[in-house]
Image: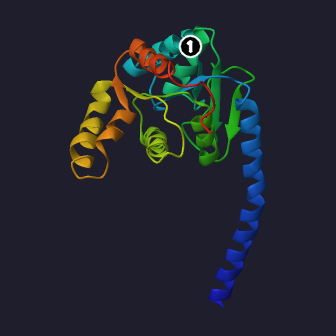
Amino acid sequence: MRKEQHTKGWNEIKTNDSWAIFKIMGEFVNGFEKMSEIGPCVSIFGSARTRPGDLYYDLAVDVAKTVSEAGYGIITGGGPGIMEAGNKGASLAGGTSVGLNIDLPFEQHDNPFIDGDKSLDFDYFFVRKVMFVKYSQGFVVMPGGFGTLDELFEAITLIQTNKIQKFPIILVGSDFWKGLFDWIQHTMLEAGNISASDLDLVKLVDTPEEVVEIIDAFYKGHDLAPNF
């Protein structure tokens, strides 16, 4: 009897999964249609918990402002913290300010610095991450937590495995990132789990000017276009 009850539950899950495909397709279609109209952008990632007045919040505002003044739009996850700072910097520069918001039970709410027609809502993390990767000409990664690391390492993996074209991935804040970078260099590399050339996929900087220099230098030899 217990096995039959479990089997019934499994069949109900399969039915729900089938209908979920249409919701997933809808998120992809809506995202592709809106993001394809925006133009060259740089994504800024970081902690939702970083407060205004924090060193890295203010730095994220300056980075986004400087990147916007260089002619790129700014994409963030649409929420508070570093995401808010990124959209704020874009807004201060009069640049394109995009927010890819995700429905979460805590931390996440859309910030007031996103352009009114460029705020997108997602239920699925994986759909949202496709939008970041497809429509970003660079990833600027500020200090953050697990979500920030997830987005960082997924982008590195996709480039490393030639699933997408290479684009700049820039870690901002050497005091925060140096320990991770040293571990990658002296533990992962020495163990033979990555190649020495993989280290070139990521740059470590501290100033907005360095961020723009890296992005501009890269696109002197590459087209500004969606990544796949």
Residue plotted at (28% across, 26% down): 175
Residue 53 visible in this rendered orientation of the protein:
no
Image coordinates of residue 27 in percent, x first then y, are 73, 44
* Position above or below: 87 against 101: above
| Image-based side of 44 in relation to 130, left or right | left
* Position above or below: 110 against 207: below
Name the residue that disc number 1 marks. Answer: 68
| Badge count | 1
What colour scheme does the image use? rainbow
What type is the residue that disc 1 sits on? Ser
Q: Nearer the viewer, residue 79 or 200?
A: 200
Say which quarter of the image contains residue 107: top right
* Position above or below: 225 against 156: above
Q: Nearer the viewer, residue 15 or 75?
A: 75
- From the image, which quarter does the N terminus lie in? bottom right
Q: Residues within 10 Å of mark 1 (few under 14, many from 20)?
A: many
Residue plotted at (46% across, 38% down): 148
* Residue found farthest to the front: 221
Image coordinates of residue 105 in percent, x first then y, are 59, 44
Residue plotted at (64% across, 47% down): 124
Image coordinates of residue 213 in percent, x first then y, are 43, 15
Say which quarter of the image contains residue 68: top right
Residue 15 visible in this rendered orientation of the protein:
yes
Q: Nearer the viewer, residue 48 or 59?
A: 59
Image coordinates of residue 123 in percent, x first then y, are 67, 46
Residue plotted at (76% across, 38% down): 30
Say which quarter of the image contains residue 75: top right
| Image-based side of 86 in relation to 27, left or right | left
Q: Nearer the viewer, residue 112 or 123?
A: 123
- From the image, which quarter does the C terminus lie in? top right
